[in-house]
Image (cartoon, helix red, strand yellow):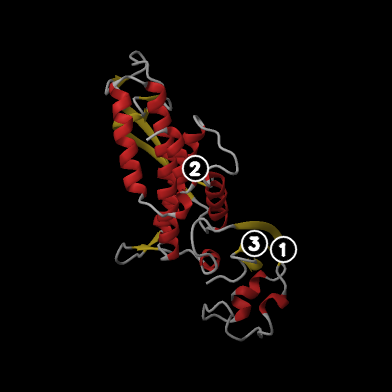
C-alpha cells in the first residue's frame, strides 16, 4: 500500500466505511517490513498514520461512552486523546482540513470545559528505577542509553518505563499534569465510590449530536443569575432542578451570583442554537 493510498483512506476515515482495527493491522505489517530494512524514515511515517487511526478510535470510543452516560471512562478517553494528539504534533503538524484531527482536538477541549470535574489528585512520585522502551536498558543520571523520549525509533515512540516508584505525597490541584485522577466521594458505611457530579450539561449536548464527527461548537460567557431564569416558581415551591428541596434553599441561592453560560452551536443538518447553563444543580 503506497503512502498516497493510505492518505486517501485516512481522508475517508470519518465515514467509518471500513474497519479501523484492520487498517491499523495492515499498516503494522507494512511498518515491520520497513523496520527490518532499517528504513527509519518510512517506519516513522507509518507510525504517524497509525497514531491518526488511534486518535479516531479513541474519539469514537469516547463518544459512545458519553452517549451511554459512562462519564468517567469517557473522560479518560478524552484525556488519552489529548495526550496522543500532543505526541503526534511533535512529528506531524496538521491543518483544519486534514483527517478530521482539528475537529477532534477542538471537540475534546470543549468537552473538557463542560465537564463538572474541577479538582484532581496529583501524586508526588520518586521514580527509583526506569528503563528505556526502545532498548530496555535501565536509565539513571550516570547511565543513559542515548534514546530521546518522544522521538521515533523503529516505528515506535520512545518513553521511559518506571519499574520502581515511591509515592511521596498527594495534593489537590485544578490543573494537573494528567486529568485521570478525578476526585470522587465515598460512602462512609460501605466505602463504595459515589459519583457526586452533575452531568446535565454533558447530557444536554449528547441529546443533540449523533456522531463524533458532527459539527458543533461552544461559546462560554459569564452571566448573573436572575429569578426569570427559573420561570414562575415560588420561593417555597419545589426547586425546578428536581432536587426535592425548596427553591429558596436550592437554585434560588444562585440569584445575583455569576455563573458560566454555555451556548452550543450545532449543525445537523441546518444551523440551530442551544442554550444551557450551570444554574440548575441537583
**Labels 3 and 2: the sequence-earlier one:** 2
Residue at 52% over, 59% down: 116
- Label 3 to label 2, Cα distance in Å? 29 Å
Residue at 62% over, 86% down: 236
Q: Compared to 54, does 146 lie above or below?
A: above
Residue 52: x %, y % from top left? 44, 41
Secondary structure beneath dot 3 equals strand
Q: Is residue 133 left or right of residue 268?
A: left
Q: Quadrant of residue 25?
A: top left
Res. 179 visible in picture = no
Q: Could you say which is closer to the camera, residue 74 or residue 24? A: 24
Secondary structure beneath dot 1 equals strand
- For label 1, the crowd category at 10 Å Cα-Cα, with few meaning under 14, some 14 to 19 and many 20 or more, is some
* Circle on res. 265: 3
Q: Are marks 3 and 2 in contact (CB under 8 Å)?
A: no
Residue 185: x %, y % from top left? 41, 60
- Label 2 to label 1, Cα distance in Å? 27 Å
- For label 2, the crowd category at 10 Å Cα-Cα, with few meaning under 14, some 14 to 19 and many 20 or more, is some
Q: Compared to 240, does 159 lie above or below?
A: above
Q: Quadrant of residue 230?
A: bottom right
Q: Which residue is mark 2?
A: 176
- For label 3, the crowd category at 10 Å Cα-Cα, with few meaning under 14, some 14 to 19 and many 20 or more, is some
Q: Are marks 1 and 3 in contact (CB under 8 Å)?
A: no
Quadrant of the drawing holding the N terminus: top left
Q: Is residue 118 left or right of residue 121?
A: right
Q: Which residue is mark 1?
A: 223
Res. 21 visible in picture = yes
Q: Could you say which is closer to the camera, residue 276 or residue 36? A: 36
Residue at 47% over, 35% down: 88
| Closer mark to the observer between disc 1 and disc 3 | 3
Residue 158: x %, y % from top left? 37, 27
Amino acid at each position: 500500500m503506497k503512502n498516497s493510498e493510505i492518505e486517501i483512506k485516512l481522508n475517508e476515515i470519518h465515514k467509518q466505511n471500513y474497519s479501523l482495527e484492520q487498517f491499523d493491522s495492515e499498516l503494522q505489517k507494512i511498518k515491520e517490513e520497513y523496520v527490518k530494512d532499517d528504513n527509519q524514515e518510512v517506519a516513522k511515517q507509518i507510525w504517524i498514520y497509525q497514531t491518526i487511526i488511534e486518535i479516531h478510535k479513541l474519539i469514537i470510543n469516547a463518544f459512545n461512552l458519553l452517549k451511554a452516560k459512562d462519564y468517567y471512562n469517557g473522560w479518560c478517553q478524552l484525556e488519552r486523546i489529548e495526550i496522543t494528539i500532543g505526541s503526534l504534533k511533535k512529528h506531524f503538524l496538521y491543518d483544519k482540513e486534514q483527517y478530521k484531527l482539528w475537529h477532534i482536538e477542538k471537540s475534546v477541549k470543549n468537552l473538557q470545559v463542560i465537564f463538572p470535574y474541577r479538582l484532581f489528585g496529583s501524586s508526588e512520585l520518586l521514580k527509583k528505577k526506569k528503563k528505556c522502551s526502545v532498548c530496555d536498558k535501565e536509565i539513571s543520571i550516570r547511565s543513559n542509553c542515548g534514546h530521546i523520549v518522544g522521538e521515533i525509533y523503529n516505528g515506535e515512540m520512545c518513553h521511559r518505563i518506571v519499574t520502581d516508584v515511591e509515592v511521596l505525597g498527594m495534593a489537590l490541584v485544578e490543573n494537573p499534569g494528567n486529568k485521570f485522577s478525578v476526585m470522587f466521594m465515598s460512602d462512609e458505611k460501605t466505602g463504595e465510590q459515589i459519583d457526586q457530579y452533575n452531568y446535565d450539561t454533558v447530557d444536554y449536548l449528547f441529546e443533540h449530536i449523533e456522531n463524533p464527527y458532527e459539527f458543533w461548537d461552544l461559546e462560554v460567557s459569564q452571566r448573573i443569575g436572575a429569578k426569570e431564569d427559573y420561570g414562575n416558581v415560588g420561593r417555597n415551591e419545589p426547586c425546578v432542578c428536581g432536587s426535592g428541596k425548596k427553591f429558596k434553599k436550592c437554585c434560588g441561592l444562585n440569584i445575583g451570583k455569576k455563573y458560566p453560560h454555555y451556548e452550543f452551536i450545532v449543525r445537523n443538518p441546518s444551523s440551530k442554537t442551544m442554550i444551557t447553563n450551570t444554574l440548575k444543580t441537583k
